[in-house]
Amino acid sequence: MTHAPGKYTDFEGLRERAVALRRAGCSRRQIRDRLQVDNNDILNRLLEGEPPPAWTKRPNAKDDLRDKARELRLRGWTYDQIQVELGCSKSSISLWVRDLPKPERRRTPEEASAIARRGWEVTLHLRDEERRRTKHAAKQAVGTLSQRELFLLGVGLYWAEGSKDKPYDRRENVRFVNSDPDMIRVFLAWLDLLGVERERVRFTVMIHETADVAGAEQHWGELVGADSSSFNKTTLKRHNPKTVRKNIGDSYRGCLVIKVRKSADLYRRIEGSWYGIVLGATQPIGEMSN
């Protein structure tokens, strides 16, 4: 850009006028227009060292947030609390308050631990309640079993937990072993459905020798509703000192063996029924083979 001859010849005089206008509160635009200085480099030299007036500074939108963040920090608030209150980032908060002392811990470690423990206990309680509701709803959904449903259930139960005949070890007899009282109840209900007389059923308690043997015998006798004449001699498992057992305590009652005498034919029916279940479960619906 060209300028009129001699326009900036008296630079010092021009500077004095520019400085006077600046100190009187004029902006760069006002000084430029009044002195007719169109060259930014010349204008910068004329105003060198002279700060702009306060009214020309652009207000910082975060100044109020910064002041509020510092105020809250001095009151002992954490970064998380300040972030929630002001809606700004933790990185900005850190820059604004990093020169301030950290707030003193208001709780002892023991108090903080107790609070966390109570919170965890509430969580566990809620989980237990949800677990209980789910189980109860599933229980109610089953309802009463038909004879066919109980029959099929018993076959599957026996094939999972009962003894089985092998080509190399012929054992065509019904023998069921379990430690779950409810499994025992269901199995006995199934035998009743099949018309197996209780006189043909024999029981044997199997338990570690270090456990409460007499208590276990009484427990199983009351569960199945049978007197001692229906029980064989209890089988004791010797304790191995090198083994760390987990099945200990008052709730440990060992296992109960249920054996049906003269049950070869019953066993064959069970095995055949199981294979029928397998066939029915693996065939497309409505395409059962003869």
Image (cartoon, grey):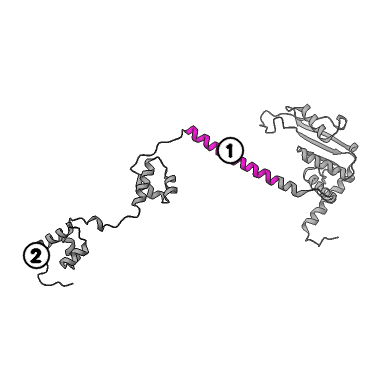
Is residue 177 visible from the viewing direction of this image? yes
Q: Which three-letter amino acid code belongs to the residue tagged 2?
A: Asp
| Residue 41 at x, y percent in the picture | 18, 64
Is 271 magenta? The answer is no
Residue appearing at x 37%, y 47% in the figure: 68
Q: Which three-letter amino acid code belongs to the residue tagged 1?
A: Glu
Q: Nearer the viewer, residue 230 or 244?
A: 230
| Residue 242 at x, y percent in the picture | 66, 30
Whether 103 is drawn above or below 40: the answer is above
- Placement of the C terminus among the 4 image quadrants: bottom right
Helix, strand or loop at mark 2:
loop
Callout 2: 10 Å neighbours few (<14), some, many (20+)? few
Q: Main secondary structure of the magenta part?
A: helix
Residue appearing at x 78%, y 48% in the figure: 143
Residue labelled with disc 1:
121
Residue labelled with disc 2:
10
Magenta stretch, residue numbers? 109-135
Q: Quadrant of residue 210?
A: top right
Q: Nearer the viewer, residue 249 or 93?
A: 93
Is residue 235 visible from the viewing direction of this image? no
Taking 75 as reference, is 222 left or right?
Answer: right
| Residue 235 at x, y percent in the picture | 79, 31
- Placement of the N terminus among the 4 image quadrants: bottom left
Helix, strand or loop at mark 1:
helix
From mark 2 to mark 1, how far is it between C-alphas? 85 Å
Q: Going from the N terminus, do you reach mark 2 or mark 1 first?
A: 2
Residue appearing at x 51%, y 35% in the figure: 113
| Residue 247 at x, y percent in the picture | 70, 33
Is 133 magenta? The answer is yes
